[in-house]
Amino acid sequence: MKKLIIISVSLIFLQLQLFSQQTEVLIDEVVAVVGNRIILESDLETQLLQHQTKGLTSGKKTMKCEILEDLMIQKLFMNQAEADSIEITDNQIENALNQRIRYFTSQFGSQEKLENFYGKSILEIKNEFRDLIKEQMMAEEAQQQVIEDIKVTPSEIRAFYKSIPADSIYTIPTEFEIGEIVKKPPVSTTELNAV
């Protein structure tokens, strides 16, 4: 009876060890949240790929940070566009899509090279970029509405901030969200043998 219990416990620990050694595959992850909108790792990678097709290569890590900042600003303007009920027509989106496909095709030399680079057909590329372009166009429209009546020069901005006492300048407090990642260590063979 005692041997049966020891064998059962050993088998359980062996299964746990085998289960913990299986590799996990990351499908996608959330890298930022702006309002009620999320930015996924795949969004970053898609934008990085677009920048690389334009010939922009300033270092992958630096470029990813810049792209993330741009996406976060875009999401802010998207929230404003929704609040202002800004609409973009399907025709405008299709025209922008066609324009980008023509640009990318000219960069690669042919549609076949473009399709090979993305590993997708032109139709699939368009479908992938459609929502992204719509968001970009809505964000641009919201940004345009925000800045359309602003006529301030950089020297006027500097003069304004120099005229304000330092303790009167509003600061935005830093916010932190703390999380805990728990990972159970695998059971070693010596522990299994001891059991």
Image (cartoon, grey):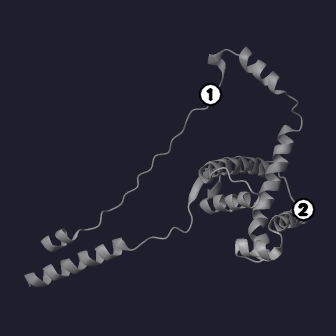
Classify residue 23 as left or right of residue 17. Answer: right
Front-most of 98 and 131?
98
Q: Quadrant of residue 117?
A: bottom right
The Cα atoms of the two marked residues, 2 and 1, are separated by 39 Å
Question: Mark on residue 43?
Answer: none
| Whole-percent x, y for residue 182 in the image | 37, 57
Question: Mark on residue 171?
Answer: 1
Classify residue 93 as left or right of residue 27. Answer: right
- Say which amino acid is labelled 2: Gln
Q: Residues within 10 Å of mark 2 (few under 14, many from 20)?
A: few
Who's the residue at 23% across and 68% down the image?
188
| Whole-percent x, y for residue 91 in the image | 91, 65
Q: Is residue 88 visible?
A: yes
Query: Label 1 near label 2: C-beta < 8 Å?
Result: no
Q: In this view, does 51 lie above or below 168?
A: below
Classify residue 154 as left or right of residue 191. Answer: right
Front-most of 83 and 10?
10
Who's the residue at 32% across and 62% down the image?
184
Residue for badge 2 = 92
> In this view, which residue lies farthest toward the front?
109
Helix, strand or loop status at disc 1: loop
